[in-house]
């Protein structure tokens, strides 16, 4: 969860500056609720209150960190008087909170420690590269839910590999969730019998240990991130920290992180007049898939472009260094 990274980075920064940290101090800066289609505003209200009252004795007030993944629903959220400020990681999240809940929030992006991502087990990286020797590797780490656009991704990939037969998609995702990924791949074999050789599931039901995940980031040639929308899109800055370019859809949250033509490529979308989870039918329109395929082929077949964008990405990630973003929290 992204909020755990926020808590860890703020705590680390306080320690680095000789500020004594107690467990309760983390909640002085941070309590989290994810507003999305699975959590009604009533439930979110309850979680807010439980977190607040459970930890309020540690401090005079609380700061809440809110991640909104889509359009919140329900009655306007009443911010308890002891909450001093609400942060959210993107302009998109801030706008959704204001529009649908009438909640004012400040934008504070998720941070990263680039040095942590440089400390990779080179043996693991070498093993991956040797296993897929001669292949161009695209890496897509994601949850198995509708927002991550897995069906769209696999449909597009089955066409991409006709033009780039050495391309392999490393899909780091639980195979069984909203989508039955093996079934999706089996279905696509009718149009491309070789598709299963070009899509590799890198994990099972359980997430990979961090060092293994990190090795895939370093071993791949680019990050694929065709999500429908994101409150933030943390894998993007993880890829940046590993000097990898990103191919993504030009959509909410994502386009705040990817600079088209500089740190990656954005495939076109046409944002609906009002955000809705019905966006899926729009994303799979042929015109959008064709642009995604076009951008993917351009990045997969141009090593110099990948190198240039990757170098820019590594420079870009420094603006998200936790020491820069969270310095205001140092007393």
Image (cartoon, helix red, strand yellow):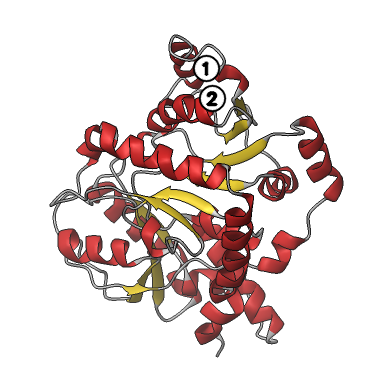
Q: Give percent across and percent down for residue 302.
A: 58, 48
- Closest to the observer, 121 or 15: 121
Q: For the C terminus, which image quadrant?
A: bottom right
Residue at 67% x, 67% y is 114
Q: In x, y percent, where is residue 176?
A: 50, 23
- Is residue 142 positioned above or below 241 on the image? above
Where 202 falls versus 274 (above or below)?
A: above
SS for callout 1? helix
Q: Give the mark, 1 or 2, whose residue is nearer the N terminus.
A: 2
In the picture shown, does residue 144 fall above or below 305?
above
Q: Residue placed at 34% from the left, 44% from the top? A: 228
User: Is residue 148 among what the camera can see?
Assistant: no
Going by the image, does 321 lie left or right of 208?
A: left
Q: Is residue 16 found left or right of 298 in the rendered image?
A: right
In this view, the residue farthest toward the top is 190
* Res 139 quadrant in image: top right
Residue 321 position by quadrant: bottom right
- Assess disc 1: are there few (<14), some (14-19) or many (≥20) residues with their C-alpha within 10 Å of its C-alpha: some
Q: CA distance from mark 1 to mark 2?
A: 7 Å
Label annotation for residue 175: 2
Vertical side of 85 occupied by 266: above or below: above
The residue that mark 1 highlights is: 182
Residue at the bottom extreme?
Answer: 331
Q: Is residue 150 visible?
A: yes
Whether tag 1 and tag 2 are in contact, CB under 8 A, the answer is yes
């Amino acid at each position: 969860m992204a909020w755990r990274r926020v808590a860890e980075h703020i705590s680390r920064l306080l320690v680095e500056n000789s500020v004594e940290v107690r467990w309760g101090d983390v909640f002085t800066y941070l309590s989290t609720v994810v507003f999305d289609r699975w959590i009604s505003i009533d439930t979110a209200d309850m979680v807010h209150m439980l977190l607040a009252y459970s930890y309020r004795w540690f401090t005079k007030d609380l700061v809440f960190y809110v991640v909104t993944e889509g359009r919140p629903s329900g009655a306007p959220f009443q911010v308890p008087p002891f909450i001093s400020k609400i942060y959210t990681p993107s302009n998109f999240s801030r706008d959704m909170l204001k529009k649908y809940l009438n909640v004012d929030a400040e934008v504070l992006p998720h941070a990263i420690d680039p040095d942590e991502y440089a400390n990779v087990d080179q043996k693991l990286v070498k093993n991956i590269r040797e296993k897929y020797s001669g292949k161009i590797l695209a890496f897509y780490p994601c949850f198995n839910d509708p927002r991550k656009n897995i069906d769209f991704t696999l449909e597009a990939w089955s066409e991409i590999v006709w033009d780039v037969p050495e391309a392999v998609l490393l899909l780091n995702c639980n195979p069984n969730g909203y989508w039955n990924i093996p079934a999706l791949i089996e279905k696509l074999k009718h149009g491309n019998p070789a598709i299963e050789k070009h899509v590799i599931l890198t994990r099972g039901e359980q997430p990979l240990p961090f060092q293994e995940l990190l090795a895939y980031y370093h071993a791949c040639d680019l990050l694929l991130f065709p999500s429908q929308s994101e409150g933030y899109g943390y894998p993007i800055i993880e890829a940046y920290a590993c000097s990898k370019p990103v191919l993504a859809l030009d959509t909410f949250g994502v386009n705040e992180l990817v600079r088209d033509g500089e740190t990656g490529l954005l495939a076109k979308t046409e944002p609906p007049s009002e955000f809705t989870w019905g966006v899926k039918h729009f994303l799979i329109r042929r015109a959008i898939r064709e642009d995604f395929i076009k951008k993917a082929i351009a990045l997969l077949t141009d090593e110099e472009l990948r190198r240039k964008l990757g170098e820019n990405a590594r420079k870009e990630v420094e603006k998200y260094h936790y020491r820069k973003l969270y310095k205001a929290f140092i007393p």
